[in-house]
Image (cartoon, rainbow, N blue to C red):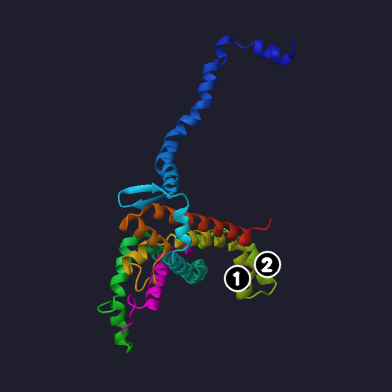
Amino acid sequence: MTAVTERVATVPPDHRVPARGWQGRRLAPYLFVLPALALFAAFKLYPIVWSFWLSLFRTDGALQTFAGAANYERLVADPLFWTALRNTAVILLVQVPIMLALAIGLAVALNSRLLRLRGFIRLGFFMPMVTGLVAYGLLFAVLLNPQFGLVNWVLGLVGVGPVPWLTDTLWARIAIGLALTWHYTGYNAVIYLSRLQSLPQDHYDAAAVDGAGAWNRFRHVTLPGLRPVILLTLILSTIGTLQLFDEPYIMTNGGPDNSTLTVGLYLYNNGFKYFDFGYASAIAYALAVIIGLLGLAQFRFLGDRT
């Protein structure tokens, strides 16, 4: 008899774990996560699966008939969908880089040791993120109203004529971009600021000893240090922009002339305005595929090479 066998044999019966008790211990962690899994399956997994199944049906009034891939074929040939996708892409390619660049500059300024009342100022820039989407959408709709908006009134005081913020195709897009920039710049700046505060000060001191100026320190120390969070905020901003709905719905309702119609708003119109749930589900899955492909591309080209 080996030493291990003798040790097990000498253990009193009262200290041995019964087989059923051991199985209960193994099942205990799964019992704790079971409520969360049940909620996920009921409110996440089931709607995702049902939405895909629904995308295979054509809706004719109250009648639904199986159509296979007909909704996806319709999607490819739908010019209004491509208009919505193009409008969304314009916001993604123009507004998001401007917003992230402003957020980086703001984070660097808020991280300065020369700044007083930094906590109060940081809170002030983060406060727009706390404002609800509907509330700030209505706020900008009132401020930018072409007839009685506060912005045009202030511009009139300095001799600038009224700007058709919400009634012109170009200015309506600019208005949406301004609202998004106001709401999300401070949020991204806080993320960058948290990363800046974790960067070693030794790197900046070494760069200063080598004669690097403020711009070179920003270029060769700050930006490389911010690279992981830049990728994070870029992916989050991409997902949020592709799902953009509240701002154009409240401020312009997709107009004028569909210039601010986004994919999210077009999905909503088909599902809850025309009650074409099959086609709306197909739009949702097409949007999910686009978001996934863009996310993979961003990880591929901007992620860590190692």
Report which quarter residue 254 is drawn in.
bottom left
Q: CA distance from mark 1 to mark 2?
A: 13 Å
* Residue name at image x 32 percent, y 61 percent: 134
**Pointer 1 local density, CA inside 10 Å: few below 14, some 14–19, many at least 20:** some
Residue 147, position as x, y percentages in the image: 26, 79
Q: Residue 30, relative to residue 47: is it above or below?
A: above
Q: Is residue 189 magenta?
A: yes
Residue 200 appears anywhere in the view? no
Q: Quadrant of the N terminus?
A: top right
- The amino acid sitting under disc 1 is Phe
* Residue name at image x 66 percent, y 10 percent: 9
Q: Is residue 290 magenta?
A: no
The residue identified by callout 2 is: 206
The residue identified by callout 1 is: 218
The span shown in magenta is: 162-190
Residue 138, position as x, y percentages in the image: 29, 66
Residue 12, position as x, y percentages in the image: 59, 10
Check disc 2 and report its element: helix, strand or loop. helix
In front here: 131 or 76? Answer: 76
In front here: 218 or 288? Answer: 288
Report which quarter residue 215 is drawn in.
bottom right
* Residue name at image x 46 percent, y 61 percent: 242
- The amino acid sitting under disc 2 is Ala
Check disc 1 and report its element: helix, strand or loop. helix
Residue 69, position as x, y percentages in the image: 48, 52
Residue 183 appears anywhere in the view? yes
Predominant SS along the magenta part: helix
Q: Residue 7, relative to residue 44: is it above or below?
A: above
